[in-house]
Amino acid sequence: MNLVTGATGFVGSAVVLRLLKRGEAVRVLVRPGADLRNLKGLQVEIVHGDLRDAGSLDKAMNGCQRLYHVAASYKLWTPNPQELYETNVTGTKNILEAARKAGVARVVYTSTVGALGLPGDGSPGTEETPVSLQEMVGHYKRSKFLAEEVARRFAGEGLPVVTVNPSTPVGPRDVKPTPTGKLIVDFLNGKLFGYLDTGLNLIDVDDVAEGHLLAATRGKVGERYILGHKNLTLQEIFGTLSRITGLKAPTLKLPHRAVLPLAYMNKWIADWITKSPPLIPLEGVKMAKKSMFFDPSKAVRELGLPQTPVEEALEKAVRWFVENGYARRRVPALS
């Protein structure tokens, strides 16, 4: 039996689908009242619980041989930053403790490349690039950095934990959507008038899911693996989206020094007036000072991580968003 946390989300649901395609039994931990759209029609056992409630996790872990701990609170703004630490750090400690008590054979912990370092010369980061907590921008990245330290501690104490660090997944079932999915949706809806000079490492979400399963069978305990593929600037990403959709890509390059004051203003409005996510997330703008370029060669070499062309992944994402009503205007190439 496999237990998957975060199974209602973007990456977690992809992991569930991959396991089911292999004919494996899957149990999912979901919070009461969670959005179950990504689990609709799937043959999974649902157990209700909360990572922040250690007592609710033993039942979920009972009888499981593998744990895929994908769940995390992924927010670049929140009115209550402490919730990020309770879910991402304390929640990870709680579920790993439950896994240790249950005697699981393997744990795959889902971290993020956001918890890794970036070289100062602009070259891609690796699993070994030095980084400290002080370099983490914002509460989300800090919480994931600390959670990864928890996972490493458990591995050092004998729990068979392998860590995976997805870069920027794109594809179907991004129901919230994630910040990257929102970027695609905003592109489809003509809300983007410019772009920052930055970049991301993109990968098909289904390749990320396969990377989780490969880490469970081929990964080395205590090691971490970047699940990524292609490094692209934002301009290149929008150019690809333009070719896929037939929509015009934004052409105005926005300097960070011009956008940063707007981001601070948006944060103040969100914090004190609207109490809802800002249009321009401050943490996202700060992160964009460096291109989030990473080298996934270790995962490709040691795990056999698949590398589906990112153009295909972006097209799948676009089609899913259009078919599920996220795009409010006609997309010429898909009409």
Image (tube, rainbow, N blue to C red):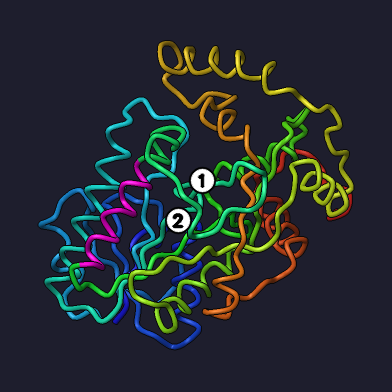
From the viewer's perspective, tell me whether residue 257 is left or right of residue 117. right
The CA distance from mark 2 to mark 1 is 8 Å
Query: Is residue 39 at all visible to an observer of this figure?
Result: no
Magenta span includes 148: yes
Dot 2 alpha-carbon crowd within 10 angstroms: few under 14, some 14 to 19, many 20 or more: many
Residue for point 67% across, 57% down: 320
Q: Give the range drawn in magenta.
A: 143-156
Kind of residue at disc 2: Gly
Numbered label attached to residue 9: 2
What kind of element bears circle 1? loop
Residue for point 44% across, 83% down: 218
From the viewer's perspective, tell me whether residue 229 is left or right of residue 223. right
The answer to which image quadrant residue 153 occupies is: bottom left
Residue for point 66% across, 48% down: 200
Mark 2 and mark 1 in contact? Answer it, CB < 8 Å.
Answer: yes
Q: Mark 1 points at which residue?
A: 176
Q: Nearer the viewer, residue 246 or 224?
A: 224
Residue for point 48% across, 66% down: 225
Query: Is residue 214 at all visible to an observer of this figure?
Result: yes
* Coordinates of residue 86 in the picture (x, y in percent): 24, 42
* Coordinates of residue 112 in the picture (x, y in percent): 47, 53
Classify 115 as above or below 59.
above
* Coordinates of residue 278 in the picture (x, y in percent): 53, 23
From the viewer's perspective, tell me whether residue 303 is left or right of residue 292. left
What kind of element bears circle 2? loop
Give whichever of discs 2 and 1 has the lower sequence position.
2
Magenta span includes 41: no
